[in-house]
Each structure stands twice: as structure tokens, then as C-alpha cells.
Image: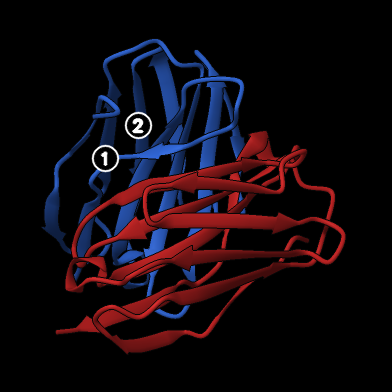
Chain colours: A blue, B red
Amino acid sequence: DAGITQSPRHKVTETGTPVTLRCHQTENHRYMYWYRQDPGHGLRLIHYSYGVKDTDKGEVSDGYSVSRSKTEDFLLTLESATSSQTSVYFCAIRPGSTGELFFGEGSRLTVL
Amino acid sequence: KQEVTQIPAALSVPEGENLVLNCSFTDSAIYNLQWFRQDPGKGLTSLLLIQSSQREQTSGRLNASLDKSSGRSTLYIAASQPGDSATYLCAVFNSNSGYALNFGKGTSLLVTP
């Protein structure tokens, strides 16, 4: 158990509404990541964080923002959800110097 | 930009067979390579991590090899079982993008009884 909790696990929302996904870790690992997984595209990096208030963009960051005000929480926000953001979102942590990543169970988001 | 390719996209084998899953990457300047397993509707489970200085890693019936110079990795599964049915993902760790992983699209494996 990598000690990662994602919430909510499932969400259905309407186009134009704001959505926030939460990733919580039980340790104090510095690096945290948000990925999305879509058929035909695999997993793609949205944003990552390398410390409190330290974040940066990934490959598919348009339409997403993140915040990390505490070490244990990394929030992903869709300011105005669109149907193209229907996806499964995964959070990951990198505990040590080996570079190994561990993933949460995912949050399935449907935007109608 | 690092591109990771996995071949085949899907594979079906009878129980008991030994099998090899392939992963290739375009930029050989990697930090490490990680293999994952994903069951339908579930998260990713880390199987093996190979550092750039290593040639292979073993865990039970799984053996992963790494050839950086040719940009290739293989995951060998011995004596396959129906419980091995899942999608297997290869990911390469680069030093840019916050040390994030670049993923292949996976190989969907079905082991039939």
C-alpha cells in the first residue's frame, strides 16, 4: 500500500462546472503527479509538484490548474469542465531516490 | 520528446506459455525504466524498476531486461497463468518534467485456461 488516496473516485458533472480532484498521501513525499488516462493515448502527465507551492506543467496542462498548500495534498482543478476532460485521472507519488512511482486507484470523471 | 512504444498492443496465449512483451524508447538517456500492471478499472501496480546502470531485474516469474543503447526493454513472463491477464505498461523516467514517467500505451494480455 503506497498510502495514496484519491477523491472522489467517481464523479459526473456538466459542462462548464468547476471540478476539484484531491490526492492525499500519508507520508511526506516531495514529488506528486497528476496523469490522465484515455483510450488510444495512454497515460499523459498533466501537472506535477516538487514541494509545497512548487508546481509545474506537464504535457497536457491546458484547462487544468493545481495547488499544493500542504505536503500531503495535491489538488487538481478543472475551472470549467469540458467533455474532452472526461477521463480517468491518476495521482502518483515518488517516495525515494530510485525514481520509482506509485499510483493511486484513480478518479473517473464524466463531463456531460 | 521521448516516445515509448509497446508491441504487441494485444496478446492472447494459452496457460503455461512463456511470453515476452516488448518496449522501445527513442531517447536512450534515461534514468530508469519501470514496468506496471493494470487490471481493468484499477490503478497501476509497479512490477519492476530497472535503473539505467542495470541490465535486468527479476521478481518471481517476471524478468525485465534493459538495453539502453538500442532503446529497448523486454518483460519476460514465465509459465503464464490466467491471473496474469491484464494490461502491462512500460514507462521511462526522464530527468526533465520533474522526473515524471513517459508511458507506452500498453500491451493487453489474455491468458486462456
Q: Residue at x 33, y 51 (%)?
A: B44
Q: Is disc 2 in contact with disc 1, using a CB cutoff of under 8 Å?
A: yes
Q: Nearer the viewer, residue A26 or A57?
A: A26
Q: Residue at x 23, y 63 (%)?
A: B39
Where residue B106 is drawn, which disc sits there?
none
Q: Is residue A78 visible?
A: no
Instruction: In the rendered view, tell whether residue A83 sits above or below residue B101.
Output: below
Q: Amino acid at mark 1?
A: Leu
Instruction: In the rendered view, tell whether residue B87 sits above or below residue A6.
Output: below
How far apart marks 2 and 1 lie (CA) works out to 6 Å
Q: Amino acid at mark 2?
A: Leu
Task: Kindly indicate the quadrant of the structure image that contains residue A62.
Answer: bottom right
Q: Residue at x 50, y 72 (%)?
A: B105
Instruction: Give the image location of residue B28, x and y in percent.
Output: 83, 56
Q: Identify the residue position indicated by label 1 in the image.
A: A21
> Relative to A99, is B47 on the left or the right?
left
Whichever of labels 2 and 1 marks the residue nearer the N terminus, that label is 1
Q: Identify the residue position indicated by label 2 in the image.
A: A75
The N terminus of chain B lies in quadrant = bottom right
Q: Chain of mark 2?
A: A
